[in-house]
Structures are given as structure tokens and as C-alpha cells.
Image (cartoon, rainbow, N blue to C red):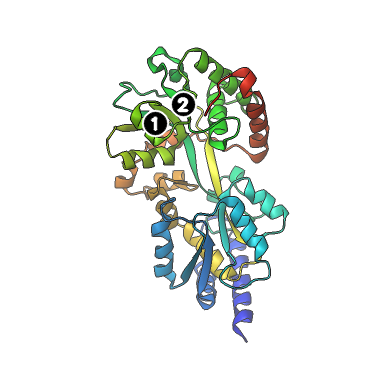
């Protein structure tokens, strides 16, 4: 029996074992078979995984060391669209330029599946992934997320806001900014939606309009600064409060090293997640190594590895409840309780509120963010 045939048989037994297990951990025998098949392939090709993003600089070598499989890193600075194009361009290529796996924004998962670019695989910890953030058939699945937070220059703001409603107070005159233009930037659009979720008391159907009204009031109160907030503008005091993804804000806190002091606040309500997803190429030259990579990423080790880079893994609540996250790491993060009521908008909901917010920002809010 040749290597290809053996790998195919082992792969089939692994997928069957994981599917049969359904929930919890896959049995040891299928996982052992998967490891053996992946080692025979000897390589994994990844794409768009910069080492300073979500701690991939630690995760990639950890996988190599654990399984003795070389990781071929393609174009670390690529975007989600580039990753999809790389699969398309290498459909018939079994060489090193063909990616086995991708890590892309949520919306790219369903479109790549529809285009026949992905193959299904369900990891052993499948049931721990929120259903709103995975394809039911296993073609793509959420890996990590960030939530909209308040990044606060504590040298300028004596009392940090704790919720969206606080930002409307006179205390925050000329202080609040977004990390993008809500007419075009996903992060800013999500921020408007998150504020609306808070104002509408969690009613998704009303959150887009409520978010626009909220920012209209924020602007009328003189609290909204129509400047795209960044670490530099935060430090300079131009935008002493920036609404942005928590992992960006926490990274800024480290980078600025206390000059100024930065507080990162997860609001009490309207906690909205932005999700990335993992998937395996339908044309993966190393399919077993790809599946083993997924098992690694969704294991406790892989999930905590992402968390070290401030990207909240999908199994975060489960890991915290099981006391599996090192205390030193928890101490660097907002309290676990801040993430208990995270909302994961569906793709259809995202499409709907994106359309409303981008089209009606000018007439409702009237602030030209740039």
C-alpha cells in the first residue's frame, strides 16, 4: 500500500471517529491515526498568520515541536480576500504555494463554502463553539473573537465610563471617538450596532436604528470627536476615549507602557463580538496535517495560546469555568464576567445592520469621521 492510500484510509477513520464522538473529546485511537497520517505528509502550509497577531509567533513553533511537522508560512501579511484567492489560484497545485488552511473574517467562510473552496471537518471540541459562529456541516468554524471596548487615556479621564450610557454624560465632552469611519469600516459599524444593542436593551431588530440615534445624541452633546481614534491620538489626548476591539486596546496598553496609562473597559451591556474563522482548503495538499492543526488550535493549549495574544478563543468561558487559564494571564485581561453576555451577530444580522448604518449615518448623525 502506498503512502497516499494509507493516508487516505487513516484520514477517513479519523473523520469517522470524530463524527461518531459528536461531543466531547475524540477517542485516542482516531487521534493517534490522524497524527500518524499527518506525520507521513510531513508539512502544513498556512497563510496570513503574522507572528504578532493573536500569538501565532508562539503557536506555530509549538505545533512544529509537538508533532514534528514543518509549518510552511505563506504571505503573513495577506488579508482574508488574499487567502481565498490563494486557494483559487492553487486548485491543481500540490506544491508549497498551496495553502492547507485559512484564518479569515466571518463573512468569508460562507462565501468560500458556496464556491466549493472548503472541505468539512469537525474538531473534537466542536460543541464548545457557539452555533452562531460555525457552519453546521463543519466547513468553517469560529476560532477567536474580540469585543468592542472603551480604550481610555487614564491620565486625562479621571473616572472611566462603565457602559455606553455613561459616554453621553458631560464628563466626556470632546472625548469619544471610533476606530474607523462608520460609513465604511467594519469595526466602527459594529461599534454603532453595539451601542444600539445597549440602548435597545438587547433587541437585535432595533439595534441599528437605536445605534444611529445614540451617536446622534452623542454628537449633539458635544462628546463625539469625528476623528479616527488610534494609539497615537489617544496618547496625544485628541481622542482620550476610543471605541475599538479589546485585543487592539490591550495591545496598545502594552505598547504605550504607561505613557499614558491606559484602561480597557468592557461595557456592561451591548457586548458585541467580531469573529474570525478557521477552515481547510478543499484542495489542501496536506489534509491530515490540516485536520491535526485544527485539533491543536481548538485544544486547551491552542485556545490559551490565542488568549495570550489577547484574542478571545471560542472556548474561553469553558476554559475559565474549568480553571484552565493561568491566573497571570487572567490578571492581564478584563474580568471573565465581562464576557459572559457576549452577543455573536449572525451573518444575516450583520448584513442588515451594516446596510442601515452605512446608508443613514450622514442623515441621522451628520458627523464626517476622518
The answer to whether mark 2 and mark 1 are in CB contact below 8 A is: yes
Picture coordinates of residue 186, whole percent (x, y):
57, 37
Q: Which residue is mark 1?
A: 233
Query: Residue 34, relative to residue 226: is it above or below?
Result: below
Q: Residue at x 40, y 54 (%)?
A: 305
Q: How many marks do you count on the picture?
A: 2
**Tag 2, which secondary structure?**
strand
Q: Residues within 10 Å of mark 2 (few under 14, many from 20)?
A: many
Q: CA distance from mark 2 to mark 1?
A: 10 Å
Locate residue 331: give its quadrant. top left
Picture coordinates of residue 37, whole percent (x, y):
54, 75
Relative depth, front residue between 283 and 257: 257
Q: Residue at x 47, y 20 (%)?
A: 224
Mark on residue 177?
2
Q: Residue at x 69, y 50 (%)?
A: 111
Picture coordinates of residue 87, whole percent (x, y):
64, 61
Q: Residue furthest left?
A: 258
Mark on residue 125?
none
Query: Residue 50, relative to residue 254: is it above or below?
Result: below
Which callout, 2 or 1, points to the residue nearer the camera?
A: 1
The mark that comes first in sequence, 2 or 1, is 2
Locate residue 167: give its quadrant. top left
Amino acid at each position: 500500500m502506498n503512502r497516499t492510500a494509507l493516508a487516505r484510509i487513516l484520514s477517513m477513520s479519523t473523520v469517522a471517529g470524530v463524527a461518531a464522538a459528536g461531543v466531547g473529546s475524540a477517542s485516542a485511537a482516531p487521534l493517534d491515526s490522524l497524527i500518524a497520517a499527518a506525520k507521513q505528509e510531513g508539512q502544513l502550509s498556512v497563510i496570513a498568520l503574522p507572528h504578532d497577531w493573536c500569538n501565532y509567533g508562539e503557536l506555530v513553533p509549538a505545533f512544529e515541536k509537538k508533532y514534528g511537522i514543518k509549518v510552511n508560512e505563506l504571505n503573513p501579511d495577506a488579508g482574508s480576500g488574499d487567502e481565498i484567492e490563494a486557494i483559487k489560484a492553487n486548485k491543481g497545485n500540490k506544491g508549497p504555494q498551496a495553502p492547507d488552511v485559512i484564518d479569515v473574517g466571518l463573512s468569508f467562510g460562507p462565501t468560500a463554502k458556496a464556491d466549493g473552496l472548503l472541505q468539512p471537518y469537525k474538531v473534537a471540541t466542536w460543541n464548545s463553539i457557539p452555533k452562531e459562529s460555525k457552519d453546521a456541516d463543519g466547513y468553517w468554524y469560529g476560532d477567536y473573537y474580540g469585543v468592542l471596548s472603551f480604550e481610555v487615556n487614564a491620565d486625562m479621564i479621571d473616572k472611566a465610563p462603565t457602559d455606553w450610557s455613561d459616554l453621553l454624560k458631560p464628563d466626556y465632552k470632546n472625548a469619544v471617538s471610533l476606530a474607523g469611519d462608520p460609513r465604511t469600516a467594519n469595526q466602527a459599524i459594529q461599534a454603532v450596532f453595539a451601542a444600539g444593542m445597549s440602548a435597545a436593551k438587547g433587541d437585535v431588530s432595533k439595534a441599528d436604528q437605536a445605534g444611529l440615534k445614540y451617536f446622534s445624541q452623542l454628537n449633539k452633546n458635544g462628546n463625539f470627536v469625528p476623528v479616527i481614534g488610534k494609539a497615537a491620538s489617544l496618547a496625544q489626548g485628541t481622542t482620550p476615549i476610543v471605541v475599538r476591539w479589546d485585543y487592539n486596546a490591550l495591545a496598545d496598553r502594552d505598547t504605550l507602557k504607561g505613557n499614558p496609562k491606559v484602561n480597557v473597559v468592557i461595557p456592561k451591556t451591548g457586548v458585541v463580538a467580531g469573529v474570525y474563522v478557521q477552515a481547510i482548503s478543499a484542495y489542501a495538499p496536506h489534509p491530515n496535517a490540516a485536520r491535526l492543526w485544527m485539533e491543536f488550535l481548538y485544544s486547551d493549549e491552542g485556545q490559551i495560546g490565542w488568549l495570550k495574544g489577547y484574542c478571545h478563543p471560542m472556548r474561553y468561558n469553558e476554559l475559565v469555568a474549568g480553571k484552565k487559564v493561568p491566573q497571570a494571564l487572567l490578571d492581564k485581561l478584563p474580568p471573565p464576567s465581562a464576557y459572559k453576555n457576549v452577543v455573536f451577530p449572525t451573518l444575516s444580522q450583520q448584513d442588515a445592520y451594516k446596510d442601515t448604518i452605512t446608508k443613514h449615518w450622514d442623515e441621522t448623525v451628520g458627523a464626517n469621521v476622518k
